[in-house]
Amino acid sequence: MAVGETDGAGSEENRNREDVIARGNILESFTESQEVRALLGNLRCVYGDSVAQEVIVEKFIETAIQLYVFSLFFPLLSLEWMMNMLLDVIRDSGSPPVLFHLAFKFLYIITKVRGYKLFLRLFPHEVTDLQPVLDMIADQNPKDCETWETRYMLLLWLSMICLIPFDLARFDGKVVSEEGHSRMPTMDRILEIAKCYLVVSDKARDAAAVLVSKFIVRPDVRQKRMADFLDWTLSMLSKSSFQSMEGTVVMNGMLIFLACFCLTAATVLECLDKCKLSESNQMVLRKLGMKLVQRLGLTFVKPKVAKWRYQRGCRSLAANLQAQGSVLQSQKITVAANEDEDDEEYDIPGEIENVVEQLLVGLKDKDTIVRWSAAKGIGRITGRLPKELADDVVGSLLDCFSFQETDNAWHGGCLALAELGRRGLLLPSRISDVVPVILKALTYDEKRGSCSVGSNVRDAACYLSWAFARAYDPSELIPFINQISSALVIAAVFDRDVNCRRAASGTFPHGIDILTAADYFAVGNRVNCYLTISVYIAGFPEYTQPMIDHLVNMKINHWDSAIRELATKALHNLTPRAPEYMANVVLPRLLPLSVGIDLHTRHGAILACAEITHALCKLAEENNRSVTYYFDGKSLEGLKQIHQEVSAGCLFYYLSDCQMYFLTVCTLIEKLSLSKMPFKGDPVIGTCFLNDLSFLSKYSLIFIKLYNIMSALSALCNEYYINENGEADPALQDELVTQYISELQSTEQMIRCGFSLALGALPRFLLKGRLQQVLEGLRKVTLITPKDVSFAESRRDALIAIAEICQTVGIKGEGSQEEYICKDNVTQIYATLLNCVTDYTTDSRGDVGGWVREAAMTSLMKVTLLLVQNEAELINANICKQIMCWLAQQSAEKIDKFRAHAGSVFLTLLHFDSPPVPHVPHREELERIFPRSEAETLNWNAASEAFPRITQLLGLPAYQYYVLLGLSVSVGGLTETTLRYSAQSLFDYMKKIQNDSSAMEGFCETLLKVFEDNLRNDRVSVPLLTMLDQMLANGCFDIFTTQGNHPFPVKLLHLCKEEIKRSKDIRKLRSSIGVFCGLIQFQGDMREKVLFQLLLLLCHPFPVIRKTTASQVYEMLITYSEVVDPAIIDEVMAILSESNW
């Protein structure tokens, strides 16, 4: 029937519509059927090859099964013909064992598509199948771990065959076989097979449980063997112990069977109690125990649906839309009226109390899967109890929500309440008791060591909330909607864990608007939730105050400092939504907390006071009001008191490893300064604030954010230390600048860092008249001396400070060098910055000089762009050339991070056009190599993109020396990708100039100059030797090989000899061997000198050098055999190859 072909009316039309919908969901054709048929038909050809087996199995999964694993409507006809093809292989007596097991493996794969329950119906289950299947099972080895799929599928097949409606005694025939031995009856054979496989550890155990649960209920088996089999099961369960692995396996099998089948409930329950599964460490055993307990409990009560349960209405959307409200109401009234009549009185066995007790204990289990099973059991059992007993169960559940209980009990309790609500077993009269529990669970968070527990409780509480929303009529929840919705909104925005925020996203009032802003993806970003989404939701009046209260009560004292900081920033953003509430209620509540004894609360409260104060002052300023409009005298005094208390305890915090309070002081000072609080002339400003910042600059550790201190210092000075004329007090300026400069020469690195950045943060009026003194002090910090060679961080921060000072004081070409950047000091500034571009200091941390070079490049860019935009004439051609050349060198070096930064700065200066940077050497050629359109897309981090571009600068005379210097380190480096692409780019360039003698001469002169300038500088010379070795091996200098005694190889030989003289560096010596062997290709007298050097290396004290020399000389003589007299060449080669060097 097509989709539109429906006829008839009423029920017939509904049936047709349902049939059409079902057919629309079914995959009508198995599109890969031909390919799968070919694969299954090919099994007989590939079973002998293990590799081919693996390939065909993978292809079968990918092409046929994987497409339908998640489909609910896999075509059943396809399952049938696939099964029949595989069963033909299995039934064929000529099939080898490998093929036999492979067919069963494919059958197992197919069962995973729809599960074994549907697949069972497709197994052939004729009488003639019984004996062959029993024989096949008997032939299997239960301990063979390679063929477990075969045993699993055979047991499932047998579970279907054993349902044949004939007495099994008819299949026994003669009890005595022809050989005279007694033959085991078929019934006993099947039970023995089940016993054998119930105690194995593989998946066949599950199939054995299915088999025996179906087989034991046959009338003939129940009458003759069921009692004995159950006795065996219980005895095995009693004898086994979960303390051993073997006992655990046996108990697992027995519990799986009993969970599938239980009639003698009291006996089984008694045996289960003795096993004490709740004490086991095996999660699977405890879960099976829960499952068995609840199923035993269900056998004690009548299988009926409780008439007293709450029924919201029809579960069909169409029926709900068509039904009238009055009809539904009358149905509910009728159900309530007939409740007593329909509810039959019957006795509840005493065992139910034991069952419920075990399920309640299971709610507190340490594993979620056990708690979830217990919760479902609570729901199932409660649904069959009278109303009074069910209410007692709810009361016992509510006892789980005590703060003396663990988070596991809270989680299990939430799951159980949700299950009861979902089933209508939690009556509206109990909602008032449950809602407070929900509200507490939505904010449950307990600190344990360095982390916390409770995210699973909050997640379950969200599930409980939505279960209630679906289970109850809206009129039942109206009294609690505001409380629940506010709690859910707060959880959706302010919860620490993303899964809880996503579980809670959505609410009742304004649900569509809020869900649009706080959808599944939006709440994934915690910062976005706190700082953006919360502001939008706070625009709805019913949520504003609850959100603020939650932040103040729960988040500013949170154990995670990141949450505390985000909460205070959120309070800053929420202040405009309720300024009076913040000023009159929240701030007075926070002030006492900011001087309390709890460190977390104190930290959060101080930050919150600072943020709220700043927000209120900004709001007052925007409305043209006084900054103190929202503050009374008590609040202002309280803000000053915070600082005094924190300052008094700073040393205590430092010794207690609470460095976060340094940042708290900084934030407090910064926010009060930005708020323009009326503290000018107050002693707290005159001494305390400034002294504290000096103290923090001096004693902050490396992980403390010095930049927070600098921003606080800048805000403080700009607000409180400037007079009406825009100038600083001379005494204060002299004291402050002198102290800061004197600390720059401290013997402690972090003191230098702190005061360097402090000088960089000073406002212009404090630098006026002392600029040259400050710059000189910072210049000295950048110098490398033997005692502070490892102070890379202080040199980096001094460079950052110089750039900040230049931007602060501004440019004036003819101005005083004590007030401006001018023609008198610009050369000194550039000299300081350019000198640091060559900082290659290394220590145990690696290339720490890279931090200095990176800061130097950034500062060069900032200062240069500042000069270009104001007075470009202060930049002379020599300075610009040095800047661009040094940047080009850094762009050709080996460390990706610094190469990318240098390349970015290089292109920024090249393409800057407001106005352009003057005196850039070879600007036109550079713009052709680095087009403006590709400046943003060029990935300098990728060696494959960077080196082909940067090597083109070798053709530009101004850049050749510096680029070659950088390439030497990259080509001779150790990083594979950098070495490969840099060497290839260099060789490509050499090929281009191979026939240009003048270009080759110029390149070789530059190369020798690089070598000569860096003689015995191992950072350059060692990789340079490696690069020369590669270049000689690749024929880069073939143009000179025909000329005798050419100056290039002669000079190169001399430099190599000087480099390795008295050296004990293994890597350097090995690199030089390759260079010497490469130099043998040049004509003239130098060949004898080269051979002499190689002979000296053959006599070197280090064995590895002798061995390497012998090996490379041997290869050299194979290539250049003419260098040795043919009469002795064989003897030389024999000595080199046969001697034990």
Image (cartoon, rainbow, N blue to C red):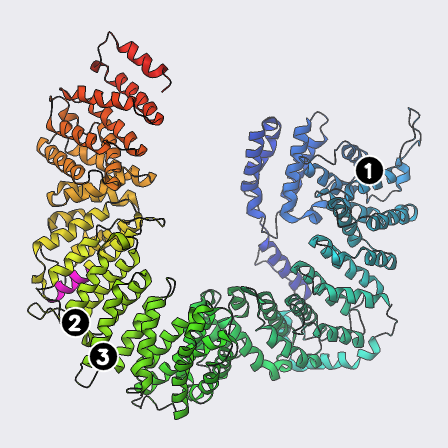
Q: Specify the amino acid type for callout 3.
A: Leu
1017 to 495, vertically: above or below: above
Decide which of 675, 438 is in the foreground and name it. 675
**In the visual, does 1082 lie left or right of 465?**
left
Residue on which disc 2 sits:
770
Secondary structure of the residue carrying numbered label 2: loop
- Image quarter for residue 369? bottom right
Instruction: Identify the residue at image location x=28%, y=77%.
Output: 715
Secondary structure of the residue carrying numbered label 1: helix
Chain part drawn in magenta? 861-870
Q: Is residue 863 magenta?
A: yes
Q: Disc 1 vs disc 3: Cβ atoms closer than 8 Å?
A: no
Decide which of 419, 635 is in the foreground and name it. 635
Secondary structure of the residue carrying numbered label 3: helix
Calculate the distance from the C-alpha at mark 3 to the C-alpha at mark 2.
13 Å
* Of callouts 3 and 2, the N-terminal one: 3
The percent coordinates of residue 1116 (x first, y second) are 26, 20
Residue on which disc 3 sits:
732
Q: Is residue 384 visible?
A: yes
Instruction: Identify the residue at image location x=83%, y=43%.
Output: 164
The percent coordinates of residue 723 (x first, y second) are 20, 84
The percent coordinates of residue 807 (x first, y second) are 19, 68
Instruction: Identify the residue at image location x=61%, y=53%.
Output: 72
The percent coordinates of residue 611 (x first, y second) are 39, 79
Calculate the distance from the C-alpha at mark 1 to the C-alpha at mark 3.
107 Å
538 to 826, vertically: above or below: below
Q: Residue furthest top?
A: 1127
Instruction: Specify the label residue 127 is tagged with.
Output: 1
Q: Specify the amino acid type for callout 2.
A: Arg
**Helix, strand or loop: magenta stretch:** helix
501 to 891, vertically: above or below: below
Q: Specify the amino acid type for callout 1.
A: Val
